[in-house]
Image (cartoon, rainbow, N blue to C red):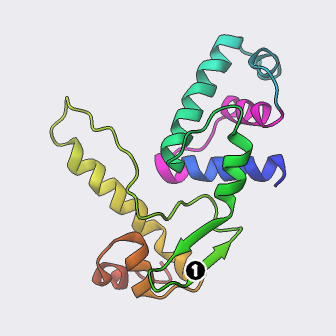
Amino acid sequence: MQVHELLQLVDEAVYLNTGKRLNDLQRGVIEGTLKHKKYADIAENCGCSAGHAKDIGYELLQMLSDIFDEPVDKSNLKSVLERQGNVNISLGNNSKINSNLIGCVNFSSKQPKTKPDKSHPGNTKLQQKNKNKTKIEKIDKLRHFGLSDEQIAEVLELPLELIKQVDIEK
Protein backbone atom coordinates (compact mmCIF):
# COMPACT_ATOMS: atom_id res chain seq x y z
CA MET A 1 0.00 0.00 0.00
CA GLN A 2 1.09 3.57 -0.67
CA VAL A 3 1.81 6.01 2.17
CA HIS A 4 -1.33 8.05 1.41
CA GLU A 5 -3.45 4.87 1.56
CA LEU A 6 -1.91 3.93 4.91
CA LEU A 7 -2.55 7.46 6.19
CA GLN A 8 -6.17 7.14 5.12
CA LEU A 9 -6.37 3.78 6.91
CA VAL A 10 -5.02 5.30 10.15
CA ASP A 11 -7.32 8.31 9.86
CA GLU A 12 -10.35 6.06 9.40
CA ALA A 13 -9.33 3.78 12.28
CA VAL A 14 -8.85 6.71 14.62
CA TYR A 15 -12.14 8.27 13.49
CA LEU A 16 -14.11 5.04 13.99
CA ASN A 17 -12.71 4.67 17.50
CA THR A 18 -12.57 8.27 18.72
CA GLY A 19 -14.88 10.25 16.45
CA LYS A 20 -11.96 12.57 15.62
CA ARG A 21 -9.84 12.87 12.49
CA LEU A 22 -6.06 13.10 12.49
CA ASN A 23 -4.67 16.64 12.63
CA ASP A 24 -1.76 17.84 10.48
CA LEU A 25 0.88 17.03 13.09
CA GLN A 26 -0.49 13.53 13.67
CA ARG A 27 -0.55 12.91 9.90
CA GLY A 28 3.03 14.21 9.66
CA VAL A 29 4.18 11.89 12.44
CA ILE A 30 2.53 8.85 10.82
CA GLU A 31 3.88 9.74 7.38
CA GLY A 32 7.38 10.34 8.74
CA THR A 33 7.29 7.09 10.68
CA LEU A 34 6.21 5.18 7.57
CA LYS A 35 9.18 6.72 5.73
CA HIS A 36 11.54 5.64 8.55
CA LYS A 37 12.37 9.22 9.57
CA LYS A 38 13.65 10.20 12.99
CA TYR A 39 11.46 12.32 15.24
CA ALA A 40 13.86 15.27 14.83
CA ASP A 41 13.31 15.20 11.05
CA ILE A 42 9.56 14.76 11.45
CA ALA A 43 9.48 17.71 13.87
CA GLU A 44 11.41 19.90 11.47
CA ASN A 45 8.93 19.13 8.66
CA CYS A 46 5.96 19.75 10.96
CA GLY A 47 7.29 22.87 12.63
CA CYS A 48 7.42 21.60 16.20
CA SER A 49 10.00 20.33 18.67
CA ALA A 50 11.37 16.80 18.43
CA GLY A 51 10.04 16.09 21.93
CA HIS A 52 6.52 17.14 20.94
CA ALA A 53 6.63 15.01 17.79
CA LYS A 54 7.85 12.06 19.85
CA ASP A 55 5.04 12.54 22.40
CA ILE A 56 2.42 12.67 19.62
CA GLY A 57 3.98 9.60 17.99
CA TYR A 58 3.89 7.67 21.25
CA GLU A 59 0.22 8.56 21.82
CA LEU A 60 -0.71 7.52 18.27
CA LEU A 61 1.16 4.22 18.46
CA GLN A 62 -0.51 3.40 21.79
CA MET A 63 -3.92 4.28 20.35
CA LEU A 64 -3.29 2.10 17.28
CA SER A 65 -2.16 -0.76 19.53
CA ASP A 66 -5.51 -0.56 21.31
CA ILE A 67 -7.51 -0.19 18.09
CA PHE A 68 -5.83 -3.07 16.26
CA ASP A 69 -5.44 -5.23 19.37
CA GLU A 70 -1.74 -5.84 18.72
CA PRO A 71 1.47 -4.02 19.67
CA VAL A 72 2.29 -1.16 17.28
CA ASP A 73 5.61 0.68 17.33
CA LYS A 74 7.75 2.66 14.91
CA SER A 75 9.45 -0.45 13.58
CA ASN A 76 6.28 -2.42 12.74
CA LEU A 77 3.75 0.33 11.93
CA LYS A 78 3.77 -0.25 8.17
CA SER A 79 3.37 -4.02 8.39
CA VAL A 80 0.55 -3.72 10.96
CA LEU A 81 -1.31 -1.21 8.78
CA GLU A 82 -0.89 -3.31 5.65
CA ARG A 83 -2.19 -6.34 7.55
CA GLN A 84 -5.15 -4.34 8.87
CA GLY A 85 -5.90 -3.12 5.34
CA ASN A 86 -6.63 -6.72 4.37
CA VAL A 87 -9.35 -7.48 6.91
CA ASN A 88 -10.80 -10.96 7.16
CA ILE A 89 -14.31 -11.19 8.53
CA SER A 90 -15.16 -14.63 9.84
CA LEU A 91 -18.89 -15.30 9.76
CA GLY A 92 -19.09 -18.37 11.93
CA ASN A 93 -20.37 -20.66 9.18
CA ASN A 94 -16.82 -20.95 7.82
CA SER A 95 -17.45 -18.48 5.02
CA LYS A 96 -15.13 -15.52 4.86
CA ILE A 97 -15.25 -12.14 3.25
CA ASN A 98 -11.93 -10.68 2.23
CA SER A 99 -11.72 -7.04 1.35
CA ASN A 100 -8.96 -4.55 0.80
CA LEU A 101 -11.41 -1.67 1.12
CA ILE A 102 -13.39 -2.36 4.26
CA GLY A 103 -11.00 0.12 5.80
CA CYS A 104 -9.44 -0.60 9.09
CA VAL A 105 -12.39 -1.99 10.92
CA ASN A 106 -11.16 -4.94 12.92
CA PHE A 107 -14.04 -7.42 13.21
CA SER A 108 -12.58 -9.90 15.63
CA SER A 109 -14.59 -11.65 18.29
CA LYS A 110 -12.49 -9.93 20.93
CA GLN A 111 -13.93 -6.78 22.44
CA PRO A 112 -11.71 -3.72 22.18
CA LYS A 113 -9.60 -3.01 25.22
CA THR A 114 -11.09 -0.25 27.30
CA LYS A 115 -9.63 1.34 30.36
CA PRO A 116 -12.60 2.52 32.41
CA ASP A 117 -12.19 5.76 34.30
CA LYS A 118 -12.68 4.78 37.94
CA SER A 119 -13.46 8.37 38.94
CA HIS A 120 -16.87 8.29 37.21
CA PRO A 121 -19.02 5.25 38.10
CA GLY A 122 -21.44 5.89 35.20
CA ASN A 123 -18.57 5.85 32.73
CA THR A 124 -18.91 2.12 31.97
CA LYS A 125 -22.50 2.56 30.76
CA LEU A 126 -21.42 5.52 28.61
CA GLN A 127 -18.59 3.46 27.11
CA GLN A 128 -20.99 0.60 26.32
CA LYS A 129 -23.42 3.04 24.70
CA ASN A 130 -20.61 4.52 22.58
CA LYS A 131 -19.43 1.02 21.61
CA ASN A 132 -22.92 0.05 20.43
CA LYS A 133 -23.29 3.37 18.56
CA THR A 134 -20.02 2.67 16.74
CA LYS A 135 -21.21 -0.84 15.87
CA ILE A 136 -24.54 0.49 14.58
CA GLU A 137 -22.71 2.96 12.33
CA LYS A 138 -20.92 -0.02 10.71
CA ILE A 139 -24.16 -1.76 9.68
CA ASP A 140 -24.60 0.11 6.37
CA LYS A 141 -20.96 -0.49 5.48
CA LEU A 142 -21.35 -4.23 6.07
CA ARG A 143 -24.59 -4.31 4.08
CA HIS A 144 -22.69 -2.61 1.26
CA PHE A 145 -20.27 -5.56 1.28
CA GLY A 146 -23.18 -7.99 0.89
CA LEU A 147 -23.61 -9.32 4.41
CA SER A 148 -27.09 -10.35 5.50
CA ASP A 149 -28.64 -8.89 8.64
CA GLU A 150 -28.07 -12.24 10.40
CA GLN A 151 -24.36 -12.20 9.51
CA ILE A 152 -24.03 -8.57 10.60
CA ALA A 153 -25.69 -9.37 13.94
CA GLU A 154 -23.20 -12.21 14.49
CA VAL A 155 -20.14 -10.17 13.47
CA LEU A 156 -21.07 -7.12 15.56
CA GLU A 157 -22.46 -9.20 18.43
CA LEU A 158 -25.72 -7.23 18.42
CA PRO A 159 -29.31 -8.53 18.52
CA LEU A 160 -30.79 -9.26 15.10
CA GLU A 161 -33.82 -7.12 15.96
CA LEU A 162 -31.55 -4.10 16.45
CA ILE A 163 -29.85 -4.69 13.10
CA LYS A 164 -33.23 -4.89 11.34
CA GLN A 165 -34.32 -1.60 12.95
CA VAL A 166 -31.45 0.29 11.31
CA ASP A 167 -32.81 1.81 8.11
CA ILE A 168 -30.82 0.82 5.01
CA GLU A 169 -31.25 4.23 3.37
CA LYS A 170 -30.72 6.59 6.36
Residue 110 versus residue 144 in the image, above or below: above
Q: Where residue 78 appears, x then y in whole percent?
A: 74, 44
Question: How many tags in the picture?
Answer: 1
Q: Residue sitting at 74 percent across and 49 percent down?
A: 6
In the rendered image, residue 27 lying in the magenta stretch gets the answer: yes
Three-letter code, disc 1: Lys
Q: Where residue 89 appears, x then y in whole percent?
A: 55, 72
Along the viewing direction, whichever of 35 and 79 lies nearer the viewer: 79
* Label 1: element kind: strand
Q: Quadrant of residue 46?
A: top right
User: Which residue is farthest left?
Assistant: 121
Q: Quadrant of residue 155?
A: bottom left
Residue identifier under label 1: 96
Q: Where residue 62 appears, x then y in whole percent?
A: 53, 34
Question: In the image, 37: left or right of 167?
Answer: right
Residue 33 versus residue 127 in the image, above or below: above
Residue numbers of the magenta segment: 15-35
In the rendered image, residue 48 lying in the magenta stretch gets the answer: no
For residue 19, say whether it is visible: no
Along the viewing direction, whichever of 138 and 57 lies nearer the viewer: 57
Q: Quadrant of residue 48?
A: top right
